[in-house]
Image: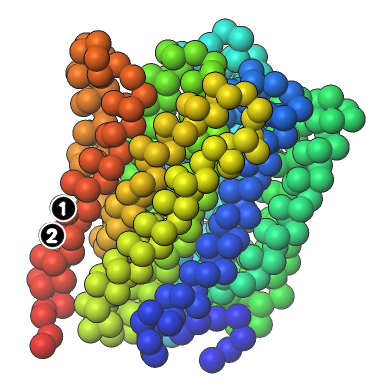
Amino acid sequence: MKKNQIDMTEGSIAAKLIAFSVPLVISSILQLLFNAADIVVVGRFAGDNSLAAVGSTASLIHMLVNLFTGLATGTTVVAANYFGARDKERLHDTVQTSMILSLWSGIILTVVGIFGAKRILLMMGSPEEVLPLAQLYLKVYFAGITASMVYNFGSALLRAKGDTQRPLVILLIAGVINVILNLFFVIPLKMDVAGVALATVLSQVFAAIVVVVILFHEKDDFHLDLKHLRLNNQVFARIVRIGVPAGVQGILFSFSNVIIQSSVNSFGPIVIAGNSAGSNIEGFVWTSMNGLSQGVMTFAGQNLGAGKTERIRKLPFISQVMVIVEGLVLGNIVVFFSPQLLSLYTASPDVIAEGVIRIKMVCTLYCLCGMMDCMANLLRGIGHSFLPMVVTFFGACGIRLLWIFTGFRFIERFHNMKSLLVTYPVSWSITWIVLVICFAIIYKKEFGVKE
């Protein structure tokens, strides 16, 4: 096996998933620290309104960028298929096409983010005292979003061949840069939310430059060839077919979270700040489980390309056991230490109390979310991206929105944060059941059940 790659078509399934996922989990947590550093610094040195402003933009940012990060997911699946099939020509075309898409994605997001920030924040019902700061944060953040897209697409290509170690090193350095710049811009320069946004942008620029240099110096079929940088229509169509439904699924989740955030906004700045801090902490658990689900997708993609469908048949049981253990352990550690963890974000007892409510309601059974994500990415890895999008819309987003617009809104005793947050584990459970049934039907129909 070549250096900096994992061939998932051979060897122990669990061992390959762990080898792939552990560096990805660590690097994903480091990436999450970009936003965590923002929130910690503004919460400690700029005040609760600044904390609420930065925290309340998270769901909006995710909603706007998810379509394009979905295309990056399509890049991983397509490249993994060609890698497993040893199709060197198409793999080379995938690299060039993906990097062009990253530039297009960044430009579109910059325009939408800068010119649409205020309008969308108003639609979300952002409080008057938070709106100017949230708008400023978004404008600076989206001014540099192209760097983030270049890194996401570049690292997606590296993941397709099992390389999760070099992205880890990149983000380790970028995370340190982000934290240092955060402290410098906010404390001595008093730049408030603009400072933390600028620090994030500059650290992402560093990550983008390094990943491009890595691809440029690759000696195999993952080489970024600037002389032949062009869009391959066949590869582009495959990436879109897999990536757009994945992105739309992300948008649907984020849209439901935006609606939930709008409901949270109705409870005032203290609840907003506590919910934002709690959500940021739970994000570390989700990121850990998502690393495994990304491994499931790459594993399925490589083995589908290699024609080794028997290995795909064994994947659901092994991955589900792994993510259940991971989710239960990490989720409940966060629940147990929630007051101490929240105190890193704010010194306000009221904000901490609201954050504890969020963490207990979501993290206790957070493994359900990981189970759902693993099944969705398994389907995506074998080329079925539209189906998990539809199931997600009705099973997860639909249930949340139905409750918000009925019982939560019109029945007074249900108009509270606990009632709002219980929709998360309920929707995860229902969606997971449907996805398991879908995979069983698809596998039997397309590959047959080999005894």
Q: Is residue 262 above or below residue 93?
A: above
Horizontally, is 14 left or right of 208 in the view? left
Image coordinates for residue 123, horizontal then vertical, percent: 44, 15
Tell me the kind of residue under disc 1. Answer: Val
- Residue 437 numbered mark, or none: 2
Q: In which image quadrant can residue 116 be found?
A: top right
Residue 377 in the image: state x and y as whole percent: 33, 60
- Expressed as whole percent of the image width and height from the top left, the position of residue 202 reads 76, 44
**Residue that badge 1 annotates:** 434
Label 2 Cα neighbours within 10 Å, binned few <14 / some 14-19 / many ≥20: few
Element on which disc 2 rests: helix
For image coordinates 32% across by 49% down, the residue present is: 365
Q: Is residue 62 left or right of residue 372?
A: right
Does residue 116 appear anywhere in the picture? no
Under mark 2, the amino acid is: Ile
Tell whether label 2 touches label 1 (CB within 8 Å). yes
Can I make out residue 266 in this image?
A: yes
